[in-house]
Amino acid sequence: MTDVTIKRALLSVSDKDGLAELGRTLADAGVELISTGGTAKALRDEGLTVRDVSDVTGFPEMMDGRVKTLHPMIHGGLLAVRDNPDHAAAMDAHEIGGIDLVVVNLYPFEATVMRGAERDEVIENIDIGGPSMVRSAAKNHQFVTIVTDPADYDRLLEELGANDGATSLDFRKRMAAKAFAATAAYDSMISQWFAFADQGERFPPMVSMTRKLAGTLRYGENPHQNAALYLPAGPHTQGLPQAQQVQGKELSYNNYNDAAAALELAAEFRGQDPAVVIVKHANPCGVAQCSTLFAAWNEALHCDDVSAFGGIVATNVPLDGPTAEAICQIFTEVVVAPGADQAALDFFAKKKNLRLLLVDSLPDPRRPGQTMAVIAGGILVQDRDNGAITRNDLKVVTKRAPTEQELHDCLFAWTVARHVKSNAIVYAKDGVTAGIGAGQMNRRDSSRIAAMKAAEAAEKHGWDAPRTVGSAVASDAFFPFADGLLAAAEAGATAVIQPGGSIRDEEVIKAADDAGLAMVFTGMRHFRH
């Protein structure tokens, strides 16, 4: 059997969008409408004839509506295999009519949770009968059409129009697959609420997290890899995927990854003076915070303008015309900002391929949550690295304490270092990164690479000395040996901020004292792999 003519339909929806048009079209085609409670009322308000489920079952809705569709007269009509003689005989014996179409969407559990409802109300918005009907109809898709998404009403009507009031097996299979995904996502949200919100578990013994396809991407990290973007099906933080893309080509896998890294770092400076972040391959290559956004762009670019070519730019304040014009002077893949004035939009419009993304607000860098990493045979889950330190958390471990300016530079460098791939070394001076060393197998090489970049910048721009001279240097984890610290001292750094905790801390502290450095321990590390 392939096509199934729709003669009898059961409609029970919490989302009434599109219901009137759907019901009217079905009724005009001679389809008998069966419905429940509010859905039946909405259809009758449109002047349609509707048969109540209680009339079909012979039982009234009871227990505050908890029991209405859970009945053999309903599920027999959904689950019966129409060409099975035994099933047909049972239908005849018990006067069970077949139901050819089920249109159901479920109680608004997510919306109820999101508006902060009390626990009892949340529990009452766990749908039981709806998922049961959905699963029954989807299982029996050989004979029954199931529609769970109002966005599919038009597709359903097009299907009926093209098939003289019937649906094809291919359509029913696609709708069944979507229906099972819908109930799985619904149950996943409920299980997550019970585990995380209601029971307060951090790592429950079993967790189900559903993701919804936002779209496929051109390719993954490399052209031979397929890729797609998925969003959490339940409540989630607004971020890059929710940004308004004002212009430019479609975002690639790498664009999303790099732009997300840039946005997270820019968010560290939300509510503060203008800051610019330039990222390349998920690592910052220049960060600056100044009195104006234009100045911050120039200072960030000077840190490493070689790596900035083809990079990602993020800001913590809305873009202005002069900054946009300056950004357009080099090849930039993506720009992300919490807004832009008309002058900025006009300048970017001249660069048709540049992707401009505007977010409503910057994410909270201290928000709770978890991150996941896929490995062969499993998934690693951990809390987000939302830890933070203040001046009061710092412990001076050297004979010389940092000056006020050195302390400011230390904290700025530390903020940037937490977003740099380990082993991370960041030199900073006057709110500007002087050199960044990322992703090396040892901390000494990161120190040297960062200093080398600073020396190249000084030579290129004709400065008297590299900006590492008189800078503060941050290390994302402790110095296991004194060599990395001594490399920073050779580059001209005068202050150091690091977690501490090495078995050779005394050796490192002595080396700092011998070099005249001021050093503070944070007691917190920020590995980023």
Image (cartoon, rainbow, N blue to C red):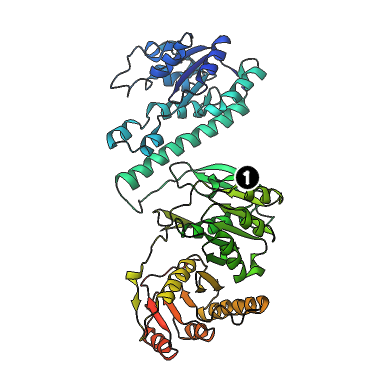
Q: Secondary structure at mark 1?
A: strand
> Looking at this rendering, what residue extends furthest in the bottom direction?
514
Q: Position of residue 107 (x, y in %)?
A: 40, 29
Residue 61 vs residue 418: left or right?
A: left
Q: Is residue 110 above or below residue 13?
A: below
Residue 221 in percent (x, y) is at: 63, 57
Residue annotated with mark 1: 246
The residue drawn where x is 54% and y is 57% is 315
Out of 368 and 331, give the one closest to the viewer: 331
Q: Is residue 225 visible?
A: yes
The residue at 37%/29% (across/down) is: 128
Residue 295 percent across, percent down from the top left? 57, 64
Q: On the picture, is 316 further left or further right than 349?
A: left
Q: Taking 71 as reference, is 177 left or right? A: right
Q: How many marks?
A: 1
Report whether residue 167 is seen. Answer: no
Residue drawn at x 35%, y 70% is 391
Name the image quarter holding the N terminus: top right
* Crowdedness near tag 1: few (<14), some (14–19) or many (≥20) residues, C-alpha within 10 Å: few
Name which quarter of the figure residue 29 lies in.
top right
x and y, in percent, of residue 50 in the image: 45, 10
Q: Considering depth in this image, is 25 or 354 the residue closer to the camera?
A: 354
Asked if 162 appears above or below 248 in the picture, the reply is: above
Task: Identify which residue, 156 or 358, lies in the foreground.
Answer: 358
**Three-letter code, disc 1:** Val
Give the residue displayed 32% in from the left and 24% down from the top.
Answer: 66
The residue closer to the viewer here, 7 or 300, is 300
